[in-house]
Amino acid sequence: MGTPFDKKIDRLGTFCTQWDFIEDRFGRKDLLPFSISDMDFQSPDVIINNLQNRLTHGVFGYTRWNHDAYKSRIVDWYQKRFETFVDSEHIVYSPSVCYSISKIIEILTFEDDHVVINTPAYDAFFKLIKRNKRQCIESDLIEENGCFTIDFVDLERKLAHPKAKVFLLCSPHNPTGRVWTSAELERLLELCQKHEVFFISDEIHMDILRKGMEHTPITKLAKNLDNVCICTSASKTFNTAGLNGSYAIIPNSWLKEQFLIQLKEKDNLSSASIFGINALMNGYQYADSWVDELNDYLEGNLHYLKDFLAEYFPKVQFQIPQATFLAWIDVSSFELTDNEIQKALIELGKVAIMRGDTYGKAGERYLRLNVGCSREKLAEGLNRLKIAMEEVLELTV
């Protein structure tokens, strides 16, 4: 018997980025997409049913977020999923995770100050830092047999620079899928404290974990809560990005106040999305078993991908990521440039997979493939990849 995640949902004609606007990034419309990091799965029934009831109500006025019904759902979620206490007074609403990160950087730093990140990195980080007129300082992760670790020597050298003011961590990491250990996170906290660098942790992928993996929110380990914050959302977890809304956990009272002034008075964005608020509240209260089933299905997809690559491209290096629904695949064994690989995938395979150098120079010769889809779609996409690469490799012999 199939699962709800096997159900094929036609997303064409819904104005969705991944399907309807694939041409914007890949230059063609007729591609099977595995690109943008949302999933092809329907959200949990409990969220859909609640939104249908809210839709029937028919009045969609300005909506408050600063109430116990909203914040207590977040507090409860952290307790049951991560055994972590969150003070509800530290929670603030935000329209998006990137908005939160951007505004916190703007508040804490001056133009030309340094924001340090690990690379490869989520591509929006580069643009966000640059457009804020801050310097993006990259510290490459170390890769060994498909596992990525932090180069603490290089990282400390960059955090020690007098202009280094913010360290921005993706936890779990996009695109490599690493779940940072408590020991790694404690070392990062020590370095930031030592060099007086504020620690922003983007934890939007925190719920998408492989069996046996445990995500540790940065506030659980921080000895100085004034020096850290979490920016996150329920949107990756429940596939509700189009409903808008995220939240941040900001223990520093001054920073929280400045953030709310920016949100409410400068940008006039404090009225929340009705549907985003309801989706988070119902998801966090009732859909934890759905998240477990989602993670089981994604793990099956990742094993399918690994077996496929082992059978048809045994020289390709791929380790199942510890978190996220994004596969980070080392295709350097093809001995082709990134441009040649993309040209083959698009023109021969008619499949859209993100090229690794999108995530910085450290991502060259990798592909980032989104497995948040039905097994049937994944199988078709991998077959297209096989057709493309076998043909182009034969042509280059």
Image (cartoon, rainbow, N blue to C red):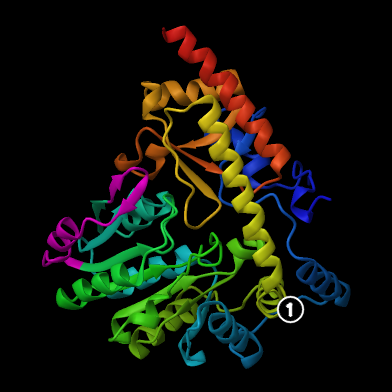
Compared with 58, 19 (above or below) is above
- Circle 1 residues within 10 Å: few <14, some 14–19, many ≥20: few
> Whole-percent x and y of residue 202?
42, 66
Residue 61 higher or lower than 34, as above or below: below
Q: Quadrant of residue 284?
A: bottom right
Amino acid type of disc 1? Gly
Reply above or below: 178 against 311: below
Left or right for 53, reference 270: right
Q: Is residue 397 above or below residue 166?
A: above
The quadrant of the picture occupied by the C terminus is top left
Q: Is residue 269 left or right of residue 200?
A: right
The residue identified by callout 1 is: 61
Residue at left offset 41%, top offset 80%: 259
Residue 225 place in picture, x, y as percent: 33, 86
Count of marks overlaid on the render: 1
Q: In the picture, residue 61 is in which quadrant?
A: bottom right
Q: Residue furthest right?
A: 56
Residue 266 seen: yes
The residue drawn where x is 65% and y is 74% is: 280
Residue under the image location 12 percent in, 60 percent down: 157
Q: Please state which of residues 188 and 298 is positioned toward the viewer in this rendering.
A: 298
Q: Which residues are magenta?
A: 141-164
Residue 28 screen position, x and y as percent: 60, 27
Is 107 colored magenta in this rendering? no
349 to the left or right of 214: right
Residue at position x 65%, y 38% from top? 378
Disc 1 secondary structure class: loop
Whether residue 106 is visible to the viewer of this picture, yes or no, is: no
Answer with left or right where residue 257 lies relative to residue 191: right
Name the residue nearer the viewer: 318 or 235.
318
